[in-house]
Amino acid sequence: MGAHILVVDDESDLLDTLQPALAAHGYRVSTARDGETALSLAAAHPPDLILLDLIMPGLDGFEVCQRLRANTRLRHIPIVMLTALHEIPAVVRGLDTGADDYVTKPFDLPELLLRIRARLAAPHAGPLRVGDLVISRARHELRRDGRTEPLTPRELDLVELFARQPNQVLSRQTVLAAVWGGDDGAASAVDVYIGRLRRKLAALQSAVRLRTVRGDGFVLDTPQE
Protein backbone atom coordinates (compact mmCIF):
# COMPACT_ATOMS: atom_id res chain seq x y z
CA MET A 1 0.00 0.00 0.00
CA GLY A 2 1.21 3.48 -0.83
CA ALA A 3 1.67 6.32 1.65
CA HIS A 4 -1.48 7.90 3.06
CA ILE A 5 -1.91 11.59 2.17
CA LEU A 6 -4.54 13.87 3.69
CA VAL A 7 -5.45 16.78 1.40
CA VAL A 8 -7.12 19.73 3.16
CA ASP A 9 -8.67 22.47 1.01
CA ASP A 10 -12.02 24.22 0.80
CA GLU A 11 -11.92 24.22 -3.02
CA SER A 12 -13.93 21.23 -4.25
CA ASP A 13 -12.47 21.46 -7.74
CA LEU A 14 -8.92 21.15 -6.40
CA LEU A 15 -9.82 18.14 -4.26
CA ASP A 16 -11.59 16.50 -7.18
CA THR A 17 -8.45 17.00 -9.28
CA LEU A 18 -5.81 16.07 -6.72
CA GLN A 19 -7.43 12.93 -5.32
CA PRO A 20 -7.34 10.88 -8.54
CA ALA A 21 -3.99 12.38 -9.59
CA LEU A 22 -2.30 11.30 -6.36
CA ALA A 23 -4.07 7.94 -6.39
CA ALA A 24 -2.74 7.33 -9.91
CA HIS A 25 0.77 7.62 -8.45
CA GLY A 26 0.09 4.98 -5.82
CA TYR A 27 -0.93 7.14 -2.85
CA ARG A 28 -3.91 6.52 -0.59
CA VAL A 29 -5.80 9.80 -0.37
CA SER A 30 -8.21 11.26 2.18
CA THR A 31 -9.73 14.71 1.81
CA ALA A 32 -11.16 17.39 4.09
CA ARG A 33 -12.84 20.65 3.16
CA ASP A 34 -12.30 22.41 6.50
CA GLY A 35 -9.88 22.50 9.40
CA GLU A 36 -12.03 20.78 12.00
CA THR A 37 -12.66 17.80 9.73
CA ALA A 38 -8.96 17.63 8.92
CA LEU A 39 -8.01 17.42 12.61
CA SER A 40 -10.63 14.72 13.23
CA LEU A 41 -9.44 12.63 10.30
CA ALA A 42 -5.79 13.03 11.26
CA ALA A 43 -6.52 11.93 14.83
CA ALA A 44 -8.57 8.91 13.73
CA HIS A 45 -6.21 7.73 10.99
CA PRO A 46 -2.86 9.58 11.13
CA PRO A 47 -1.64 10.15 7.56
CA ASP A 48 1.95 9.93 6.35
CA LEU A 49 1.76 13.50 4.97
CA ILE A 50 -0.68 16.39 4.92
CA LEU A 51 -1.25 18.85 2.07
CA LEU A 52 -2.78 21.84 3.85
CA ASP A 53 -4.42 24.93 2.40
CA LEU A 54 -3.68 28.04 4.45
CA ILE A 55 -6.74 30.20 3.80
CA MET A 56 -10.00 28.46 4.67
CA PRO A 57 -13.20 29.63 6.35
CA GLY A 58 -13.48 28.79 10.04
CA LEU A 59 -10.34 27.06 11.26
CA ASP A 60 -7.62 28.16 8.85
CA GLY A 61 -4.46 26.29 7.91
CA PHE A 62 -2.29 28.23 10.34
CA GLU A 63 -4.39 27.08 13.31
CA VAL A 64 -4.62 23.51 11.99
CA CYS A 65 -0.85 23.39 11.69
CA GLN A 66 -0.35 24.72 15.23
CA ARG A 67 -2.75 22.14 16.68
CA LEU A 68 -1.09 19.29 14.81
CA ARG A 69 2.34 20.31 16.08
CA ALA A 70 1.00 20.53 19.64
CA ASN A 71 -0.29 16.94 19.48
CA THR A 72 2.39 14.42 20.49
CA ARG A 73 0.79 11.71 18.31
CA LEU A 74 0.62 13.87 15.20
CA ARG A 75 3.44 16.41 15.42
CA HIS A 76 5.85 14.26 13.37
CA ILE A 77 3.62 14.28 10.25
CA PRO A 78 5.16 16.27 7.37
CA ILE A 79 2.99 19.24 6.34
CA VAL A 80 3.21 20.86 2.90
CA MET A 81 1.27 24.09 2.62
CA LEU A 82 -0.88 24.83 -0.41
CA THR A 83 -1.29 28.57 -0.77
CA ALA A 84 -2.42 31.06 -3.37
CA LEU A 85 -0.64 33.77 -1.41
CA HIS A 86 2.65 34.79 -2.97
CA GLU A 87 3.53 37.30 -0.25
CA ILE A 88 6.54 36.22 1.78
CA PRO A 89 4.95 37.14 5.15
CA ALA A 90 2.18 34.57 4.62
CA VAL A 91 4.67 31.85 3.71
CA VAL A 92 6.91 32.76 6.65
CA ARG A 93 3.94 32.68 9.02
CA GLY A 94 3.02 29.23 7.72
CA LEU A 95 6.55 27.95 8.26
CA ASP A 96 6.61 29.54 11.71
CA THR A 97 3.51 27.58 12.73
CA GLY A 98 5.33 24.34 11.92
CA ALA A 99 4.84 23.56 8.22
CA ASP A 100 7.75 21.85 6.46
CA ASP A 101 7.35 23.09 2.91
CA TYR A 102 5.01 25.04 0.65
CA VAL A 103 3.72 25.05 -2.91
CA THR A 104 2.01 28.11 -4.38
CA LYS A 105 -1.17 27.78 -6.43
CA PRO A 106 -1.50 27.20 -9.30
CA PHE A 107 1.15 24.46 -9.09
CA ASP A 108 2.42 21.82 -11.47
CA LEU A 109 1.67 18.26 -10.43
CA PRO A 110 5.28 17.11 -11.08
CA GLU A 111 6.55 19.78 -8.67
CA LEU A 112 4.04 18.76 -6.02
CA LEU A 113 4.92 15.08 -6.43
CA LEU A 114 8.60 15.93 -6.08
CA ARG A 115 8.02 17.73 -2.79
CA ILE A 116 5.83 14.92 -1.50
CA ARG A 117 8.48 12.31 -2.31
CA ALA A 118 11.19 14.41 -0.65
CA ARG A 119 9.20 14.72 2.58
CA LEU A 120 8.29 11.03 2.65
CA ALA A 121 11.83 9.91 1.88
CA ALA A 122 13.40 11.40 5.03
CA PRO A 123 15.60 8.63 6.45
CA HIS A 124 15.05 6.95 9.81
CA ALA A 125 18.00 6.56 12.15
CA GLY A 126 18.91 6.19 15.80
CA PRO A 127 19.52 9.09 18.19
CA LEU A 128 22.34 11.48 17.32
CA ARG A 129 24.33 13.18 20.11
CA VAL A 130 26.02 16.55 19.82
CA GLY A 131 27.29 18.48 22.82
CA ASP A 132 24.68 18.23 25.58
CA LEU A 133 21.88 17.39 23.12
CA VAL A 134 20.27 14.19 21.88
CA ILE A 135 18.49 14.38 18.54
CA SER A 136 15.86 11.67 18.16
CA ARG A 137 14.60 11.03 14.65
CA ALA A 138 12.23 8.33 15.85
CA ARG A 139 10.54 10.72 18.30
CA HIS A 140 11.10 13.92 16.29
CA GLU A 141 12.55 15.80 19.22
CA LEU A 142 15.55 17.44 20.84
CA ARG A 143 16.38 16.28 24.36
CA ARG A 144 18.57 17.64 27.14
CA ASP A 145 18.56 16.56 30.77
CA GLY A 146 15.00 15.25 30.64
CA ARG A 147 13.64 18.27 28.78
CA THR A 148 12.35 17.92 25.23
CA GLU A 149 11.47 20.17 22.31
CA PRO A 150 9.45 18.77 19.37
CA LEU A 151 10.88 18.98 15.85
CA THR A 152 9.05 19.14 12.56
CA PRO A 153 10.49 16.90 9.82
CA ARG A 154 12.21 19.87 8.17
CA GLU A 155 13.66 21.07 11.49
CA LEU A 156 14.92 17.55 12.09
CA ASP A 157 16.68 17.45 8.71
CA LEU A 158 18.27 20.83 9.39
CA VAL A 159 19.54 20.18 12.91
CA GLU A 160 20.92 16.79 11.84
CA LEU A 161 22.83 18.46 9.00
CA PHE A 162 24.58 20.77 11.48
CA ALA A 163 24.98 18.09 14.16
CA ARG A 164 26.90 15.83 11.77
CA GLN A 165 29.32 18.69 11.07
CA PRO A 166 29.64 20.57 14.37
CA ASN A 167 31.88 23.64 14.60
CA GLN A 168 32.05 23.85 10.81
CA VAL A 169 30.63 26.76 8.86
CA LEU A 170 28.01 25.65 6.33
CA SER A 171 27.11 28.09 3.58
CA ARG A 172 23.51 29.00 2.81
CA GLN A 173 23.84 27.17 -0.52
CA THR A 174 25.07 24.04 1.27
CA VAL A 175 22.05 24.15 3.58
CA LEU A 176 19.69 24.72 0.64
CA ALA A 177 21.19 21.82 -1.30
CA ALA A 178 21.13 19.39 1.64
CA VAL A 179 17.75 20.21 3.15
CA TRP A 180 15.74 21.82 0.34
CA GLY A 181 17.24 20.00 -2.63
CA GLY A 182 18.87 23.15 -4.00
CA ASP A 183 15.58 25.07 -4.36
CA ASP A 184 16.69 28.72 -4.51
CA GLY A 185 13.09 29.75 -3.91
CA ALA A 186 13.42 28.43 -0.38
CA ALA A 187 16.27 30.81 0.52
CA SER A 188 14.05 32.94 2.76
CA ALA A 189 12.84 29.82 4.56
CA VAL A 190 16.36 29.04 5.77
CA ASP A 191 16.32 32.03 8.13
CA VAL A 192 12.88 31.05 9.44
CA TYR A 193 14.08 27.57 10.36
CA ILE A 194 17.37 28.77 11.80
CA GLY A 195 15.37 31.09 14.07
CA ARG A 196 13.07 28.28 15.15
CA LEU A 197 15.97 26.01 16.05
CA ARG A 198 17.65 28.80 18.02
CA ARG A 199 14.52 29.29 20.09
CA LYS A 200 14.33 25.57 20.84
CA LEU A 201 17.99 25.41 21.86
CA ALA A 202 17.39 28.37 24.16
CA ALA A 203 14.31 26.71 25.65
CA LEU A 204 16.43 23.67 26.50
CA GLN A 205 19.14 25.95 27.97
CA SER A 206 21.65 24.08 25.84
CA ALA A 207 25.28 25.08 25.60
CA VAL A 208 25.05 24.27 21.88
CA ARG A 209 24.55 27.41 19.79
CA LEU A 210 23.49 27.88 16.16
CA ARG A 211 25.37 30.97 15.04
CA THR A 212 25.26 33.08 11.89
CA VAL A 213 28.65 33.83 10.34
CA ARG A 214 28.04 37.00 8.40
CA GLY A 215 28.72 36.54 4.71
CA ASP A 216 29.66 32.87 5.10
CA GLY A 217 26.72 30.92 6.49
CA PHE A 218 25.93 29.18 9.77
CA VAL A 219 27.76 27.05 12.33
CA LEU A 220 26.64 24.84 15.19
CA ASP A 221 28.97 25.70 18.06
CA THR A 222 29.47 22.94 20.63
CA PRO A 223 31.24 23.26 23.98
CA GLN A 224 34.96 22.56 23.74
CA GLU A 225 36.23 20.23 26.45
Image (tube, rainbow, N blue to C red):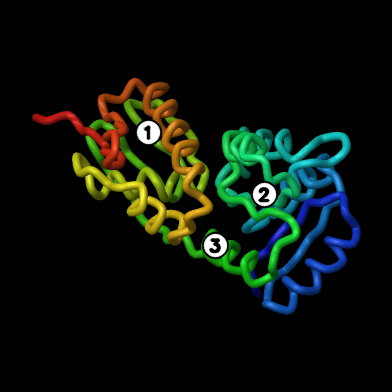
Q: Is residue 224 left or right of residue 20?
A: left
- Is residue 72 something that shows in the picture? no
The residue tagged with tag 2: helix, strand or loop? strand
Number of other residues with Cα within 10 Å of mark 2, as a class: few under 14, some 14 to 19, many 20 or more: many
Residue shown at 62%/33% (left/top)? 70
Number of other residues with Cα within 10 Å of mark 3, as a class: few under 14, some 14 to 19, many 20 or more: some
Residue 38, given in percent of the width and then of the height, sits at 79, 47
In the image shown, does 220 or 68 lie closer to the viewer? 220
Residue 183, given in percent of the width and then of the height, sits at 48, 58
Relative to 172, is 199 above or below? above
Q: Earlier in the sequence, mark 3 or mark 2?
A: 2
- Is residue 64 something that shows in the picture? yes
Residue shown at 31%/33% (left/top)? 212
The residue tagged with tag 3: helix, strand or loop? helix
Residue 55, given in percent of the width and then of the height, sits at 79, 41
C-alpha gap between disc 1 and disc 2: 28 Å
Residue at which label 1 appears: 143
Q: Earlier in the sequence, mark 1 or mark 3?
A: 3
Amino acid tagged 2: Met
Residue at which label 2 appears: 81
Of the two numbered discs 1 and 3 in the rendering, the one whose residue sits closer to the viewer: 3
C-alpha gap between disc 3 and disc 2: 15 Å
Relative to 210, is 122 above or below? below
Relative to 73, is 184 above or below? below
C-alpha gap between disc 1 and disc 3: 24 Å
Identify the image quadrant of the C terminus.
top left
Q: Which mark is residue 177?
A: none
Residue at which label 3 appears: 120
Identify the image quadrant of the N terminus.
bottom right
The residue tagged with tag 1: helix, strand or loop? strand
Residue at far right of view: 12
